Image: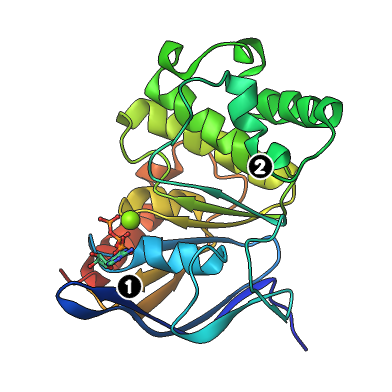
Amino acid sequence: MNTSILEARALSKIFDTAQGDLLAVADISFAVAPGEFLCIVGPSGCGKTTILELLAGLLPPTKGQVLLAGNPLVKPPPEIGIVFQKPNLMPWRTVIDNAILPLQIQAAPPDKAKQSGRQALAMVNLGEFAQAYPKELSGGMEQRVALARALVQQPNILLLDEPFGALDALTRERLNLVILRLWQHQNLTAVMVTHNIREAVFLADRVLVLSPRPATISAEFIINLPRPRPKGVEYSETFGALAYEIRQAIKE
Ligand SMILES: Nc1ncnc2c1ncn2[C@@H]1O[C@H](COP(=O)(O)OP(=O)(O)OP(=O)(O)O)[C@@H](O)[C@H]1O
Ligand SMILES: [Mg+2]
């Protein structure tokens, strides 16, 4: 029986560079259960973004395959939304026009697209900024627009590539709560890459630890903390012990 919604099956990725072949991901296999929150941690440059882009169908694997609900993935599907390390907003487009870009690319009817855009902006608490331009936003707000753009097609899988890595700790904490709320209320499956171990423990049901490049899975941790995460859980002994164990498993 296939109980995974997303599966990496013996995935390898070799980049063809001026210096020759570069093996970024080496024979990685893992499965994500429906509704799961999976975090992937690993040292810088180990292949985390590459893995996420393979899962999203944005990058073809050199070997192996990605399965979406058991079917081979050949192109980016509407069921998967992705948020990148940088917001990549178009400065000449308003917030809502940035958010609905994926719908416009598919030539969705303009009225419907705007309506979906307004819904997605409301989910990230940016409803009042629909007509603003990116230069009028803070870094945290820009990343929320990027999140709205990922949600606009009502995906059931959300892939997040260190979405808040460039933000201050408090904003990051607040946006992680936004992610958790969306994950819970929209019944999403989430895969988030981060190199912040405590963030991974706070958010995830399970954490995969990657080796230095080429990325292989070097350890896996089940995070058995209650949901919703109780206030102050980050300061509990169990939390600290898990974070320490994960830190020990990361080799640089
Ligand atoms: N398009 C590309 N062409 C050539 N090499 C690439 C390409 N994308 C990534 N790489 C290489 O693959 C390796 C893994 O890169 P990747 O961006 O996946 O790492 P990462 O774990 O996301 O790093 P970081 O934590 O810094 O974001 C690096 O050595 C990088 O130089
Ligand atoms: Mg990266």
Mark 2: amino acid: Pro
Which one is in front in this view, the residue at disc 1 or the one at disc 2? 2
Q: Quadrant of ligand 1?
A: bottom left
Residue 89's place in the image compared with 49, above or below, is above
Q: Quadrant of the N terminus?
A: bottom right
The span from disc 1 to disc 2 (Cα, nearest Å) is 31 Å
Task: Name the residue: 63% across, 61% down.
Answer: 76
Mark 1: amino acid: Leu
Task: Name the residue: 61% across, 37% down.
Answer: 149
Q: Is residue 132 visible?
A: yes
Q: Quadrant of the C terminus?
A: bottom left
Residue 150's disc is none
Query: What x and y, as percent, mark residue 126?
Result: 61, 19
Callout 2 secondary element:
helix
Task: Name the residue: 43% across, 68% down.
Answer: 51
- Mark 1 and mark 2 in contact? Answer it, CB < 8 Å: no
Q: Of 29 and 134, which appears nearest the observer?
A: 134
Q: Which residue is mark 1?
A: 210
Q: Of 60 and 18, which appears nearest the observer?
A: 18
Counting labels gives 2
Q: Of 83 and 219, which appears nearest the observer?
A: 83
Q: Quadrant of residue 234?
A: top left
Q: Which residue is mark 2?
A: 102
Q: Earlier in the sequence, mark 1 or mark 2?
A: 2
The answer to whether residue 168 is left or right of residue 85 is left
The answer to whether residue 139 is left or right of residue 159 is left
Query: What x and y, as percent, mark residue 87?
Result: 44, 35
Mark 1 Cα within 10 Å, few/some/many (few <14, many 20+)? Answer: many
Query: What x and y, as percent, mark residue 249?
Result: 26, 72
